[in-house]
Amino acid sequence: MLLKDKVAVITGAASVRGLGFATAKLYAEQGAKVVIIDLNADASQAAAASLGAAHLGLAANVSNEQQVNAAIEQVLGKYGRIDILVNNAGITQPIKLMDIKRENYDAVLDVSLRGTLLMSQAVIPTMRAQQSGSIVCISSVSAQRGGGIFGGPHYSAAKAGVLGLAKAMARELGPDNVRVNCITPGLIQTDITAGKLSDEMKTAILAGIPLNRLGDAQDIARAALFLGSDLSSYSTGITLDVNGGMLI
Ligand code: NAD
């Protein structure tokens, strides 16, 4: 078991078809105590309960500092430590550059970028005190390619911001043995993509994927296990592409 007795906080993990829940499930199977943080308390609790009694489901909007800090206080009250944070919560909006209004920009940047900052700030004092920790941030191939899949330009910008923030955090936290790394998923079949791709779009996208399939949530969960666990003990500030070869 790679995560025996580790405490892992995963945001946006209540959606059972999503990348966060797949990661939560794999982490639980590997011995971690998992905390699922998502917008809806019932959904978070149900998702955590489905993994077993050792796990916890909490409600928080990751872009709300008060809610984030209250959730992390609850985690520390119950488990006393935090070993892994997976910044997974994110939203996308398939709109074009000139259609981006302030509210679109704010909504997308708030969840992915501000959420990653606030959640990380909330756990860092604990990880520093422990002199150990791993923060895994979910970016996107859209940050590297400038979209071209389903997110708008503001989504690409938010996810590129996550890459920069993660590297800066890795540099600053390295001396405290806190590692920070990113995963850049390609196109993965979850609720975020369901119904947003026509057959033509899918065919065109597959033509650009050497492995000739869309990803599934397990592909990302396994990468998150590598980065969250000691398997990646000498990696910090890296970007792990999990995209079927889309960038070759
Ligand atoms: P999903 O929509 O299935 O899950 C996202 C979860 O985040 C949902 O449970 C939602 O309730 C939660 N969430 C949204 N806003 C929140 C907030 N403010 N606070 C707390 N939770 C919030 O999406 P997914 O496909 O599993 O995506 C997970 C992550 O992976 C996202 O960051 C997404 O941008 C990224 N990603 C997905 C793909 C893909 O193809 N599916 C590709 C690249 C990157």
Image (cartoon, grey):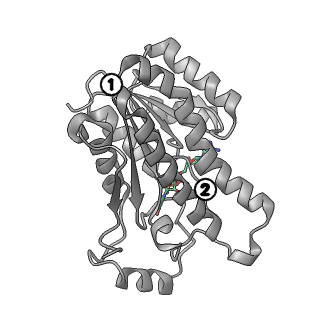
Of the pair 150 and 85, the residue shown nearer to us: 85
* Type of the residue with mark 2: Ile
Of helix, strand and loop, which one carries label 2?
loop
Quick one: quadrant of the N terminus? top left
Q: Is residue 152 visible?
A: no
- Please state if 149 lies on the left or on the right of 152 as rendered: left
Residue shown at 36% from the left, 60% from the top: 216
Q: Is residue 142 above or below residue 222?
A: below
The part of the image, by quadrant, that contains residue 30 is: top left
Judging by the rendered image, the residue that carries numbered circle 1 is 6
Q: Position of residue 47 (x, y in %)?
A: 49, 36
Residue shown at 42% from the left, 17% from the top: 129
Neighbour tally class for label 1: few under 14, some 14-19, many 20 plus, Cα within 10 Å: many
* Callout 2: CB less than 8 Å from ligand 1: yes
Q: Is residue 55 above or below residue 15?
A: above
Of helix, strand and loop, which one carries label 1?
loop
Neighbour tally class for label 2: few under 14, some 14-19, many 20 plus, Cα within 10 Å: some
Quick one: quadrant of the C terminus? bottom left
* Type of the residue with mark 1: Lys
Judging by the rendered image, the residue that carries numbered circle 2 is 91
Q: Position of residue 73 (x, y in %)?
A: 57, 18
